[in-house]
Image: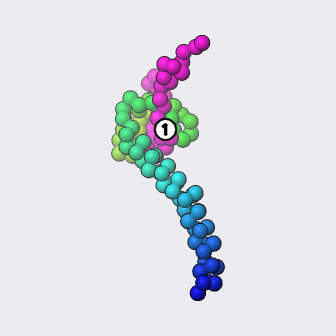
Amino acid sequence: MAETLAGILPFLLLGVLMYALLILPQQRRTKAHKQLLAAIAEGDEVVTNSGIYGFVKEVEADVIWLEVAQDVELRVSKSAIASTVTAPSASDTTED
């Protein structure tokens, strides 16, 4: 009995380690991305997965209309939004 437990223990530890290093971080990233998508509103500046920056003009069920230039709008999938763009703070833009 103790021999089989000693043989199985490394595999159990490997499974726990893989879960902690691979699965948990991915679940956290997925949860954070879902929260980001739920919080997107008109007027937000966002960047897509392909690197396109734009301002949200309209949010539909699974589609977002981005204004990328004056009078130029793109229809993108909501899941294609990678992040929102935050304006640099005043301390970041001051020069010495």
Residue to which mark 1 is pinned = 83
Residue 18: % across, % down: 59, 62
Numbered disc total: 1
**Quarter of the figure that contains the C terminus:** top right
Horizontal and vertical percent for residue 66? 44, 33
SS type, badge 1: strand
Vertical position of residue 65 compared to residue 93: above or below: below
Amino acid type, residue under disc 1 in the picture = Ser
| Structure colour scheme | rainbow
Judging depth in this view, the residue of 11 and 34 nearest the camera is 11
Residue shown at 54% from the left, 18% from the top: 93
Please provide the residue range marked out in magenta. 67-96
- Left or right position of 83 against 42: right
* Outermost top residue: 96
Where does residue 52 sit, x and y in percent of width and height?
54, 34
Residue 73: tell me if it is visible: no
**Is 12 displayed left or right of 81 in the figure?**
right
